[in-house]
Image: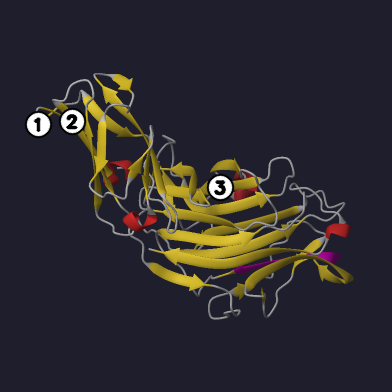
């Protein structure tokens, strides 16, 4: 079973009878995210050949839906209605041929919203562990909110903190909702502004099972043809700052029961994609989102689908996810794999405007 099969029906007809000679085909299904126009690419097939939409009659049962030569655009207010959208097609070469495309619309219900007017300790935990290099530590605070934003700082301190027996002058930060909020399936969305630094900073928005990391799973892969691959980490957004290709990574990490990290590597397998954000600007806010369904996973940047995985299936006991925001620093001389930040650029801040979760 795939999300496409669950949500899309393509039918062709000749003189009203079922026929496969004429079809309107959706190139890829995805559910979309709240607040943005839902876009689908399509193509028209007539007797095994792709033909132009020009001259064909095409219409939707909702007049607010509109069409380009190869694209269907569904306004957010139409998606919000839910139900099934039906698109009808009439052949330009022979009027006896018709086709329909039926797409289920995803209707979301808001389950969590934080606009960071205050720091909600009933929702957030301060993380005290996470620094990626020996020269840094993760600094837990009582309050991360400033100016109606969740602010995670990258800093250099005048006096050191001892971590693992070493003096550390650099700190990063993180928060999570473990034990306070978790959800199985849905849309996880945030709006944030990334810190202005060309390298040496690593920002992330991700999900982990509300259970045992690497042992409890969200879903399994179905495309490997071998042993069980269970996902216990969804990286909705990771930004490894790079001035030349500023963008975001969208990743899942997979293990199997009793996986031995010491002898078998960090993960059994990973699936990822790096997306270069068009016209990226440091002073601009971007919305990063992920929709996790029973049979599909979809990643978005400002409403644009940038990666999907429909080769998944639920495990026997699907674990809900808790949410993490983290930022990691690579000081000069640390050898951090995501680069090293110059002292004169510090401090820097990952600024999170809001978080919204839907089911």
Helix, strand or loop status at disc 1: loop
Q: Residue at x 49, y 57 (%)?
A: 215
Q: Residues within 10 Å of mark 3 (few under 14, many from 20)?
A: many
Which quadrant of the figure has residue 91?
top left
Q: Which mark is residue 217?
A: none
Task: Compare marks 2 and 1 and give the one earlier in the sequence.
Answer: 1
Give the spatial CA distance, label 1 vs label 3.
44 Å
Give the spatial CA distance, label 3 vs label 2.
39 Å
Look at the image and say whether residue 168 sits in the magenta stretch: yes
- Horizontal and vertical percent for residue 280? 66, 47
**Relative to residue 94, is residue 42 drawn left or right?**
right
Q: Which mark is residue 98?
A: 2
Helix, strand or loop status at disc 3: strand
Residue at the right extreme of this rendering? 158
Task: Compare marks 1 and 3 and give the one earlier in the sequence.
Answer: 1
Of residue 210 and residue 84, the one placed in the foreground of this image is 84
- Horizontal and vertical percent for residue 90? 21, 31
| Circles 2 and 1: CB atoms closer than 8 Å | yes
Which quadrant of the figure has residue 27?
top left
**Relative to residue 99, is residue 356 drawn left or right?**
right
Task: Compare marks 3 and 2 and give the one earlier in the sequence.
Answer: 2
Q: Residues within 10 Å of mark 2 (few under 14, many from 20)?
A: many
Residue 165 can be seen in this image:
no
In the image, which residues are magenta? 167-175
Query: Looking at the image, is mark 1 or mark 3 nearer the viewer?
Result: 1
- Horizontal and vertical percent for residue 66? 34, 43
For label 3, the residue is: 250
């Amino acid at each position: 079973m795939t999300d496409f099969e669950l949500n899309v029906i393509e039918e062709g007809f000749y003189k009203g009878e079922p026929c496969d000679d004429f079809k309107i085909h959706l190139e890829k299904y995805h559910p979309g995210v709240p607040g943005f126009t839902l876009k689908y690419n399509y193509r028209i097939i007539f007797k095994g050949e792709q033909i132009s939409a020009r001259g064909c009659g095409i219409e939707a049962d909702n007049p607010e839906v509109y069409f380009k030569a190869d694209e269907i655009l569904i306004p957010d207010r139409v998606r919000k209605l839910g139900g099934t959208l039906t698109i009808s097609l009439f052949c330009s070469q022979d009027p006896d041929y018709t086709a329909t495309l039926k797409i289920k619309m995803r209707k979301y219900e808001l389950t969590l919203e934080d606009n960071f007017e205050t720091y909600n300790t009933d929702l957030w935990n301060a993380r005290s562990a996470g620094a990626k290099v020996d020269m840094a530590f993760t600094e837990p605070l009582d309050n991360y909110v400033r100016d109606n934003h969740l602010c995670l700082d990258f800093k250099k301190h005048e006096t050191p903190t001892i971590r693992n027996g070493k003096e550390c002058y650099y700190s990063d930060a993180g928060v999570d909702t473990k034990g306070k909020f978790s959800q199985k399936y849905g849309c996880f969305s945030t709006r944030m502004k990334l810190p202005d630094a060309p390298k040496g900073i690593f920002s992330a928005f991700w999900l982990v099972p509300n259970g045992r990391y690497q042992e409890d799973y969200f879903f399994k892969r179905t495309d490997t043809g071998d042993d069980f691959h269970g996902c216990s980490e969804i990286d909705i957004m990771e930004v490894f700052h790079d001035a030349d290709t500023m963008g975001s990574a969208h990743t899942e990490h997979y293990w199997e029961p009793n996986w031995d990290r010491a002898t078998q590597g960090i993960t059994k397998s990973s699936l990822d994609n790096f997306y270069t954000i068009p016209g990226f600007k440091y002073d601009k806010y971007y919305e990063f989102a992920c929709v996790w369904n029973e049979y599909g996973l979809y990643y978005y940047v400002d409403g644009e689908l940038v990666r999907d995985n429909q080769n998944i299936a639920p495990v026997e006991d699907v674990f809900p996810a808790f949410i993490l925001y983290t930022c990691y620093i690579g000081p000069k001389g640390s050898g951090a794999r995501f680069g090293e930040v110059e002292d004169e650029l510090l401090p820097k801040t990952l600024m999170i405007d809001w978080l919204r979760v839907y089911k």
